[in-house]
Amino acid sequence: MRKYELEQLLHNVKHSDLTIDDAVKQLESLQIGDLGFAKIDNHRELRVGYPEVVYGEGKTSEQVTEIATYMQAKGQNVLITRSNDHMYETVVKACPKARYNPLGRTISIVNKAYQETSSKISIIAAGTSDLPVVEEAYETAKIFGNKVEKIIDVGVAGIHRLFNQMDRIREAKVLIVVAGMEGALASVVGGLVDKPIIAVPTSVGYGANLGGVVTLLGMLNSCASGVSVVNIDNGFGAAYNASMINRL
Amino acid sequence: MRKYELEQLLHNVKHSDLTIDDAVKQLESLQIGDLGFAKIDNHRELRVGYPEVVYGEGKTSEQVTEIATYMQAKGQNVLITRSNDHMYETVVKACPKARYNPLGRTISIVNKAYQETSSKISIIAAGTSDLPVVEEAYETAKIFGNKVEKIIDVGVAGIHRLFNQMDRIREAKVLIVVAGMEGALASVVGGLVDKPIIAVPTSVGYGANLGGVVTLLGMLNSCASGVSVVNIDNGFGAAYNASMINRL
Amino acid sequence: MRKYELEQLLHNVKHSDLTIDDAVKQLESLQIGDLGFAKIDNHRELRVGYPEVVYGEGKTSEQVTEIATYMQAKGQNVLITRSNDHMYETVVKACPKARYNPLGRTISIVNKAYQETSSKISIIAAGTSDLPVVEEAYETAKIFGNKVEKIIDVGVAGIHRLFNQMDRIREAKVLIVVAGMEGALASVVGGLVDKPIIAVPTSVGYGANLGGVVTLLGMLNSCASGVSVVNIDNGFGAAYNASMINRL
Amino acid sequence: MRKYELEQLLHNVKHSDLTIDDAVKQLESLQIGDLGFAKIDNHRELRVGYPEVVYGEGKTSEQVTEIATYMQAKGQNVLITRSNDHMYETVVKACPKARYNPLGRTISIVNKAYQETSSKISIIAAGTSDLPVVEEAYETAKIFGNKVEKIIDVGVAGIHRLFNQMDRIREAKVLIVVAGMEGALASVVGGLVDKPIIAVPTSVGYGANLGGVVTLLGMLNSCASGVSVVNIDNGFGAAYNASMINRL
Amino acid sequence: MRKYELEQLLHNVKHSDLTIDDAVKQLESLQIGDLGFAKIDNHRELRVGYPEVVYGEGKTSEQVTEIATYMQAKGQNVLITRSNDHMYETVVKACPKARYNPLGRTISIVNKAYQETSSKISIIAAGTSDLPVVEEAYETAKIFGNKVEKIIDVGVAGIHRLFNQMDRIREAKVLIVVAGMEGALASVVGGLVDKPIIAVPTSVGYGANLGGVVTLLGMLNSCASGVSVVNIDNGFGAAYNASMINRL
Amino acid sequence: MRKYELEQLLHNVKHSDLTIDDAVKQLESLQIGDLGFAKIDNHRELRVGYPEVVYGEGKTSEQVTEIATYMQAKGQNVLITRSNDHMYETVVKACPKARYNPLGRTISIVNKAYQETSSKISIIAAGTSDLPVVEEAYETAKIFGNKVEKIIDVGVAGIHRLFNQMDRIREAKVLIVVAGMEGALASVVGGLVDKPIIAVPTSVGYGANLGGVVTLLGMLNSCASGVSVVNIDNGFGAAYNASMINRL
Amino acid sequence: MRKYELEQLLHNVKHSDLTIDDAVKQLESLQIGDLGFAKIDNHRELRVGYPEVVYGEGKTSEQVTEIATYMQAKGQNVLITRSNDHMYETVVKACPKARYNPLGRTISIVNKAYQETSSKISIIAAGTSDLPVVEEAYETAKIFGNKVEKIIDVGVAGIHRLFNQMDRIREAKVLIVVAGMEGALASVVGGLVDKPIIAVPTSVGYGANLGGVVTLLGMLNSCASGVSVVNIDNGFGAAYNASMINRL
Amino acid sequence: MRKYELEQLLHNVKHSDLTIDDAVKQLESLQIGDLGFAKIDNHRELRVGYPEVVYGEGKTSEQVTEIATYMQAKGQNVLITRSNDHMYETVVKACPKARYNPLGRTISIVNKAYQETSSKISIIAAGTSDLPVVEEAYETAKIFGNKVEKIIDVGVAGIHRLFNQMDRIREAKVLIVVAGMEGALASVVGGLVDKPIIAVPTSVGYGANLGGVVTLLGMLNSCASGVSVVNIDNGFGAAYNASMINRL
C-alpha cells in the first residue's frame, strides 16, 4: 500500500465512500504476513516507499514462489534478485506475468506499475564483464518506476569513449557507476559532473583483486568528493538508492 | 563562478552590457591557478557545482594560507578541512573572516553566501565520540548553503532515544548517519525511513575495531537497502554528497 | 556417566548394593575409548557435564558410525554435527534411533533423555537464510535437555517485527542471537533485555562480507554490553554455552 | 531505579503510601537525561539490570565529571572505564566517594551497594601483562555486586601452575579467562570444567600478534566447546556478561 | 649421491680401484638433469643431505612419472607429495616398487634405504582430522631413514589424553606437533618437554579459521619458547626439518 | 593502424596518391567500433602502440569470436588471453589463422606481423608450476614482435641452476622474472644484473600463500632495487611492459 | 668503478700503460669494504650499473657518515635516502659537497657526474601531498645522470589539468606516476601514452586507505596494461627502474 | 636445578651424603615461587632444560628486579629480554653481575655458567638494520652455553657477500637466519646447506611490509625445505630453539 492509497482510503472513510468495516479489513493487511519460514513486511511500502525485495540466494524455488504469490495477491510489485533459471521456471507457473533477466538474474512481476519519472538515472559501466551488475541495477530501477539509461564499456583505459558520452551523462539526475579492477571510473566521472554518484565495485579482475575488495576500497578512497559506495556487485542497492534520490 | 553567473555574463555580452574585452578577462579567470606547489581548479565550481575544498592534512599552514588568499581574491567561499589551531592562526591573519570549528577541525571563509535551502539535511550520530565527524559534516553542509540539523547520542544500545527523534528525522530530505563500533545505527534508521542515507563509519571503538574498518564493512553489509557509504571519518564527503542531493 | 550416576554407584558400593568387582568394571569404562583413528573421551560427561559431540566434517560415514555405535553401547546420547544425507543413512543402519535434521545437518540419538529444564533458551534469528545455524543450535540445546524456542526473521531492517516478539524474548533465561550481514540484531536485542546473549555470526551476505568475518567483528564491537560471541555459523557452540548457563 | 524499587513504588501507590503526584515525579526521572553532549539513559537499570557505564576514552575530564555528578544525583552507582589520572582528579573533586584503580584504569563511585552474590566469578589470567584487563573486569564485577576471585599467572607454558588452582576454579559459577599470545588458556580450562567461560583476548604479545587479533581469532576457534568471546582487552564486557550469568 | 659415496669414489680413484674415466662418468651425473619442463638437481643430495622431493600438485601424472623414472635410474629414493590416485597408477607402471599412502597423498619409491636412526621423531596430533598431515610427515620421515612414532587425537580439550602419552613423548629426540583450530597443543607440549618442537598448523576448523591462518599465527605467538613453525598443512616440511635434527 | 601507416596515408594525400574521399573513409575506421556489448578501441594502436588485447575470462565464446572477427577485418593482430578450448574451437572457425597455446591459454591471430626486434626479452621462471604464466608472457611478447627466450626451473632452492644461465640472462635487454612461493628469485636476479626487471608473482604455493598475495608483497619488498611488479599471474601485463621497454 | 673504467684499465695493462702491480691494487678495491657494521659492495657499480645507495632509516648519523666517507674516498657518487636534518649536518661536516633535499629527505654527494641523458624521465604526481615521494624520485634520477621533469598536481578529480600537460608527458621516454588515494592517475595516463609507466603508490589518504595498501593494490589492478608498480612511497625504487630504462 | 643436580642430590641421599631432611628442603624449592604479581616456575629448568626467561616489555623495572633477585637467590642464571636503560639501572643495583646489551635490549646475569658447547650456532643476518634481533639471539644463545658466531650484512642483493662466508656457515650445527624485507636470505641459505635453519623475520622494511608480516609469510612459503620460522623480531625464540638443537 502506497502513501497516497492510504490517504485515499482515509478520505473515502471520511466521505462515507468506504464503510469502516471494509476499511478495517484493508488496513489489517498492513500486518506482517507470516509464512512460517519468513515474515513478509506488508507495512514496508508505506514506511520506506517500496515493497520488500526478495533476495533469492539461499532460498529454495518453492519458498520464493510462495513469497511471490503472497505479495502478488496483495497487489504488490515483486522483484526477486539473485535468482536462477530453475527459480524462474517455478515462479512463472504461479505468476505468469513474471519476467526473467538472465544476465542480471532478476525476476520482475509488475502488478501495479509506477508512473515513470521524468528525470533520469544513468548507469555507467567500465567494461563488458560488469554487465550482470548493470542489469540488476537496471531492473531494480525500472520496477521502481524510474527512467533509466545504460552507458557501457567506457572504462578509463580508453578515456575518449567516456568523453564521447558526457552529454548524455550530464542529462541524468543521479549516476550509478559500475566498475571492477581499480575502480578509477568513479573518480574520473566524479570530477566531471555535479550530480550525486553511487559507485558499485564489481568482483571483476584477477590476481590481487581480492574478490572486489580492492575495487571497493579504491572507490571509498576516491579523490573525487561526490562519490558514495555500496557493497561489491550490489547493483540492486545502488539502484534502490538512486531511485530514492531520483524521486526527490 | 557559478552557472547562473556565467549565463548572466553571456547575457550581458549579448545585450552589450559587457564589452567582449571585459568578458574575455573574466572568462580567463576560469583557468587553473598555478601556485607552484598546487594548481587551483577555478573551473570547478562551474563544472561540479562547488569550489575546491582544501584538505589541510599534509600541507603547511603557509601553503593553506596562500591557497585561501588566492581563492578569496577570486571571491570564492573557502572551506579547509583537517586543519588545526596553528593553521587557523595563520589563515585568519590573511583572511580575517575565517571562522574555526576546533572540534570539527574546519576553517570556513564565507565570501559569497549561498541561499539556504528550504529542505533539510539531518546528521544523526550514535555517540558523543562521533562528534568531530558530525561537526566536519555540519560545517561542510553549512558553507554549501544547506539547512542542517544535528541529532546526537541516539545509538541503538538505548534504542528509545532514537525513536524519540523519529519525527524530526522524517522531516529531512536526506540523512547522514554517523556511527562507530558495529555501525548498527545505519541499518536501524534505514529500516525506518524513505530517504536516502549516507553512512559515515567512524574510527571510534577499541579492540578488534581495526581503526574503523569493521564499522565501514558492517555498514556496507547493512541489511537495510537505502544506505550508501563514504570513507571512515569522512564527514566532509558525506555532507558533500548530501548537499548535492539536497539541492536536487 | 553423569555426576549423580557416579554418586549413586559409590553409594551402592558403600551400602553393598554393588560388589567392588562390578563397580571396578563400570568405572573402567571411564577410560579413553581408543578406536584407532580416534580416542573417545568417556570421562568427559562427568568432567564437563556433557558427552563428547561428534564433528562430522572431515570424517567418513564409517568413522562416524563406529563412534556412534561405541557411544551408544556406553548408553550415552549422541549428537553429530555437520553431517550429511549419506552419513545419516550409514548411521541409522547401526543406530535405528538416529534422527536427522537436514537443515541443521545434525544427527541425534537419544539413549537417555535429560529432564527438560523449566527455564527457556530463545534462539532469535534475523533472516530466513540463518535457519541452518538456528537448527543446529536448536538440536544441540534439545539433546542437552533444554526447553528451547525459535523466533525467526526479525532482523532490524523491519524492527517492528522484533518489537512484536519482545514479550516472548523477555521470558527466556538466556538468548542466542543469530544474524548475518552487519549483525546489528545482537546490539539491538542487547540494549533491550537483561539476559546474557550469545551472538552467532553467520556467513550470510554477499560482496565484502568476507564469509562472515565482517559480521563476527561487528558483533564483537557491539555497542551493547551483554553480548559475547562464538565462531561463524557455530550454532552448536552457542547452544552448548547457553545450555551451561540455562542449567545454572 | 531497580526493578524491586519500581514494584515498591507501585505498591505504595496502590496502598496510598505514596500520592500520585509524588509517584509521577519519581517516575519522570525515568526519562533520558540530556546533558547536551550526551543523553543519559536513566531507564537503563530498570530495562537491562545495570545503570549506564561511562566509557572514558575520547571524553574530556569535564564531560565525564558532569555525567558522574548527574548520575550520582540520581543515586546511581557510577563506573567509569578507560579513565586516567587527570580524569580521576577532576571527578573526585565533585564526587568525593570516587575510588581509582590505576592499573585497571577504572573510577568507581558506590552510592547504593548491591548485596554481594553468594556464587562466585573467577577471573583467570595467563600472565603478569594481562593484569590491566583483569583489574578492569574485577572492578566491573565488584560494583555490580558479585563475589569475585583473581587467579593470575597460570598460563599453559607451565601448566602445573594451572592444575594447582583447579579446585578453586571449580568452585566458581562462571569463569573469565584472560590471555594474550595464542590464547591457549581458554581451551585448556574449557576442557576441564563444566562452567560457562567468557574469554578475553588481550593485546599482549609481539611480532605477528596483530594487536590481539590473533588471540581473538584463536579463542573463537577454540577446540573446547564452552567458550564464548568478547572484544580485545574488554575486561568490562566480560565482567558485565559474567555478572548477568552469576545473578541468574 | 651421498657424501660417503663421493668419498668412496675419490678413495677408489686414489687407490686405483676406479679409472679416472669411469670416475668422470659417475661425477658427470652430478649435473642438473634437464627434462625440458624441469631441471633435476642431482647435486642436491650431496649438498643438503637429501635428494629432491617431487611436489605433485600442478604437475601432470606424466611429468611426475618421467621425473620418478629419471631419479630411479640414478638409484635415488623418490618421494612424491600431494599426489593422487591417478598419479600413482601412472607412476607404478613405470616404477613397480612405488608405494602409495592415500591419506597422506604420498608416493614413495625406496631404491636405496637409509639405515634407520636409533633416535626417534614423535608426531603428535590434536585430532582425527589432522591425519592427512600426520601421514605426509610420517612418510617423509620414513623415507629419510628415521624411526618415527605417531601419537594422535590428544588435543587439549581433553588434556588427560595427552598426559597419558607423556612418557612416550619424552623419549623422542625431536617432536612434530600437528594441530588445527587455535593450535594450543603446541604451546602445551612446549611447556612440558625439553626437545625442539616443529609445529604444523592445519587447515582444520570452520568459521573464522581463515584456512589455517589463525592456527598458523597462534602457533607463532605461542607462549612456549621451544616452538618453531612451518607452513599450513606442510607435513613434509616439518618432517624434513625434524629429520635434519634427528640425524645430528 | 600504426603510426607509420598514418604518416604514409597523409603523405599519400599530400602527393595526391590518395583521394581525400578515400582518406576520409580510412580515417573513419579510427572510430570506436560499437558491437553492442563492447566498444572496440580502433584508435588504440595509434595512441599506445598496440591494438586492444581481448581478455577472455567472463566473455562468451561467441562474444570473443565477434570481436576477433571485427578486429581481423580491420587487419589488426588479435591476442586473446585467459581463453579455453571451447573458445578456441569457436574462434578458429571464423578466423582459420588462429593458433592456440593451451598451457598459456592464449589465442593468437597474426594478420600483419611486426618485424622482430634485435634485442631480446628473457623470461626467467622459478619452477615447473610457473609455466602457464611463462607461456602467457611468451605469446604476448611474440605477437608484439619481440625476440623472446625462456629460462625455466631456476629457482633459488638450487641456486647453481640460475648461475649456469647468467650469461644468457645478461644478454637480454629486459627481464621478466616469474616466481611463486616467497618470490626470492626476483631479488637474487635483481642483485646480479643491470637490466630492468618486471616481476610476476604466481599463485603457486600452498598453506599461507594466500593465492599469491604473499609472493606479490614479497616482490614489492624486494631488497634489490631494479624490480617493479605486476599483478598475480599477469604474464600478459609483464610482457606488455617488457615489450614497450624492448622497443625503446 | 664503471664498466668503461674497467675496460680502460685492462687496456692500459695490455699496452703497458699500467703496471700489473698497480692494476692489482686498483682491482683489489673491487672487494667488499667491511666497516664492521656493514659490508660495502664496491663491485656493485660494475655489476648492476650503479653504486650502492644508502638507506638512512634505522642507521645512526655516524654510521651513515662513515659509509659516505668510505664511498667518497673510492670516488663514487653517494645517495642517502630516508635521511633527516641531523644526519645531513653530520654528513656534511665530513663530505662538504653533500647537498640536502629536505622534502625528499635525500642527501646527494656528486663526485663524478654522469653525462646527462638526452632522453627524459617525467615524474607525474596527483597532488601536493605526494611531493616528498616526487622529490626522492627526482634526486635519485638526477644523481644517476638522467634528464628529469616534474609535472605535479594533475590528479583525475580535475582531469583537464592532466590533459593540459599531455604534450610534455608524451615527450618522455619513461614515466613515473605518483599518486595516493585510489591511484586512478596511473590508469588514466596508462590509457593515453605508449611509454612504460612505473607507478608509485603513496601513503596519502585517510580512513580505509590502510597506509597506502589500497593505492598499491589499486595500481596493480589497473585496467591499463603498461603499468608496473613499486612499493609504497618508494620514489627511489621507481627512479632507479626508470633510470635503467632511460639509459637503454 | 638442572637434571644432573637432581640426580646428584638423589645419589647423595642414597649414599647418606645428604640427610632426608635437607633433601626435602632443597626439593621444596622446586615449587612455584609466588611473588604476588607473578608465579616463578622454579621447576622449569628441570623440566624443559632452561630456567624461565623474563620478558621485560610491560613489566615495571621494579617487578623485573624483584624477579631477578629471586632467581639469583636460587642460583639460577637470569636473562631479561626487551629491557631498557632504566630497567638495567634498577636491576644492576640489586644484581651487580648484571650485564646489559643495549642493541639487543637484553640483561644477562650469569650465576652458574653452562659449559660451552663444542658445536656452533651461526647467526646470519641480511642487513645492518637486523642487528638488534641478531644481538638478542646472540645473548640468548650465549647464556645457554652455546658457541655462537655472527655473520652479518650478507643479504641476497649482493649475493657474493654470502658466498664468501659459506665455509664458515657450513661449520655450524644449526643456523639462525635473520632478515627483513622479502626474507629471501632464508631460502637461498636453505638451498645451500644440510643443517636445520630457524628463520627470524624482522620488521625491517617500508611501504607494504606490514610490520614484518610480509617477511614472516615469505619465509613460511620458502621454496627451500629445511626452514622453520619463529615470530617477527623474535631473536630470543630462535636462539632458544637453536640451543635445544645444538645440545642434542
Image (cartoon, coloured by chain):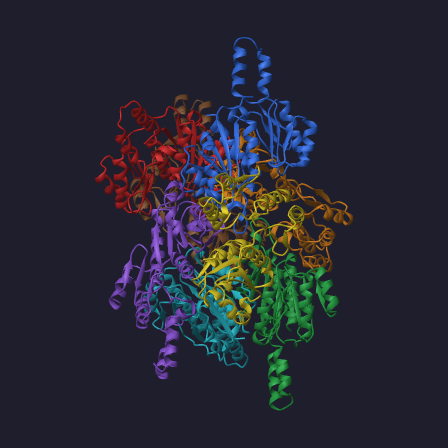
Chain colours: A red, B blue, C purple, D yellow, E cyan, F brown, G orange, H green
Evaluate whether residue E30 shows in this view. no
Location of residue E236 in the rendering, given as x and y in whole percent from the top left corner: 45, 66
Task: Tell me if residue C132 comes above or below residue G133 in the rendering.
Answer: below
Outermost residue toward the bottom? H15
Pick whichever, A161 or A218, lies toward us.
A218
Location of residue A30 in the rendering, given as x and y in whole percent from the top left corner: 32, 36
Location of residue C144 in the rendering, given as x and y in whole percent from the top left corner: 36, 62
Quarter assignment of residue E59:
bottom left
Quarter assignment of residue C90:
bottom left
Pick whichever, B217 or G124, lies toward us.
B217
Evaluate whether residue B56 shows in this view. yes
Pick whichever, H202 or F88, lies toward us.
H202
Q: How many marks?
A: 0
Pick whichever, G237 or B207, lies toward us.
B207
Task: Tell me if residue G214 comes above or below residue E182 in the rendering.
Answer: above
Outermost residue toward the top? B16
Task: Tell me if residue D169 comes above or below residue C125 in the rendering.
Answer: below
In the picture, which quadrant includes the C terminus of chain C?
A: bottom left
Location of residue G205 in the rendering, given as x and y in whole percent from the top left corner: 56, 40
In the picture, which quadrant includes the N terminus of chain C?
A: bottom left
